[in-house]
Amino acid sequence: MFKLSNGIPLLAAGTMVCFVGSADAYFQVYDYATAQAGTTATFIDSIAVDGTTAYNIMRTNENVVTKVTDIGGTNTASVLTTDATWGAFSANAIAGLNGAEVVGGNLRFANFFDNSIQSVDLGTGAPSAYVSNADLLSSLGLIAADFNVSATSAVNGSGEVGFYNADSGARLIAITTGAGSATAVLNQAEILALTGGNTLSGGMGFVGDDLYFGSNTADGIFKVDTATPAGGSAVLTQADIIAVTGHTSAGFGDMFAAPDGNIYFYETGKDSIMSFDPTDPANTLATVVSEAELLAGPANSDLVGNFTWFDGNIAWSQTSSSSGRVRGLYSVPEPASLALMGLGGLVALRRR
């Protein structure tokens, strides 16, 4: 599906069309108080949804993981990992930001405070190191002064974590290779050759072994095969993106490889949610939720982060309460639900 800059829809095979007002483009699944689950934590760091259960990594004042069951229904909240439990495990804050995922009975994430890959057991709430800081340094041949795990990370279907070392002394993209080990898939020179710079931006997403990521140097999206790295390749150029957005540049926030086969990303040039089919990126690139729709919706904000998947659609969190923003978990509704919301002047296209 495509949404043209003048608002006229261009239909592709299989496109479902629902007529809605811009304020109906998304809805709040649950609010900030629900995510807190009675704790005093003041910042939603990450949200990962598994079916009808969501896990919230919360920090500031307290470091906790909360659990919300029957999301979109009763939204019943509880504390999975207490502040005391986390404090006994780590002297640093908990963090997963854009890359936390549920896999194999665990919530797994790259923690940029501990510079390690960690897990939380979804049954007991117990935290553990999947690959410790010492193991990462040893595996990658780095010293602590040259190591800074960034918020740019993703978890693949096997539970391995791809992540970016953002320290200027040894920037690289790496992936864990089982408990206690990791390997580099792009070194600093290779990132420079591929993107024209050695800094990355936004989130990451896995499609099989292929790890997708954005570069604000090239204003483009790239990928690397983590199983057999060979320098990586371009996926979408700046020209591809601005041809759809109509903007003069492109930029990237979070990225998410969704169960529907598409990759979703937050495009910071036009402050919108976009998607593409990785089998034909340039010809399927489309706006999913525009800046106007984001601003008109219940979050009252065009800032988007923590992409996840709820009820067959892209979902995200709003973590800030400044400037009237409303914190919580948000999602695009099902097309059938959209149709019931009433007719509006804007045509919203959802590719399934």
Image (cartoon, rainbow, N blue to C red):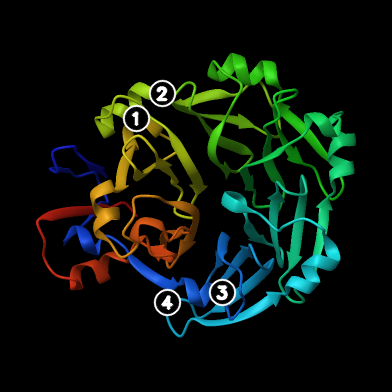
Q: How crowded is mark 1: few (under 14 residues within 10 Å), some or many (20 or more)?
A: many
Question: Mark 3 — residue?
Answer: 36
Quick check: can you spot residue 290? no
Dot 3 or dot 1: first in sequence order is 3
Q: Give the class, few, some or many, for how many residues have Cα within 10 Å of label 4's Cα (few <14, many ≥20).
A: some
Residue 240 in the figure: left or right of residue 153: left
User: Relative to the observer, which residue lies in front, 322 or 345?
Assistant: 322
Q: Mark 2 points at which residue?
A: 237
C-alpha gap between disc 3 and disc 1: 37 Å
Residue plotted at (85% across, 67% down):
88
* 298 vs 19, nearest the viewer: 298
Q: What element carries label 1?
A: helix
Nearest the eye: 345 or 283: 345
Image spot of residue 94 (x, y percent): 70, 58
In-front residue for pair 157/302: 302
**Residue 241 circle label:** 1
In percent of width and height, residue 134 lies at 89, 42
In this view, 252 is above or below 27? above
- Residue 342 screen position, x and y as percent: 14, 70
Label 4 – label 1 distance at C-alpha: 33 Å
Question: Disc 3 or disc 1, which is closer to the eye?
Answer: 3
- Quarter of the image where one finds residue 152: top right
Q: Distance between the residues labelled 4 and 2?
A: 37 Å
Counting residues from the start of the chain, the first of labels 3 and 2 encountered is: 3
Lower position in the chain sequence, tag 3 or tag 4: 3
Q: Which numbered tag is attached to residue 336?
A: none
Q: Which amino acid does label 3 sit on?
A: Gln
Q: Mark 4 points at which residue?
A: 72
Residue in view at x 79 percent, y 73 percent: 84
Residue type, label 1: Ile
Tell me whether the residue at label 2 lies in contact with that at label 1, contact meaning CB atoms closer than 8 angstroms. yes
In three-dimensional space, the C-alpha distance between marks 3 and 4, rounded to whole angstroms, equals 16 Å
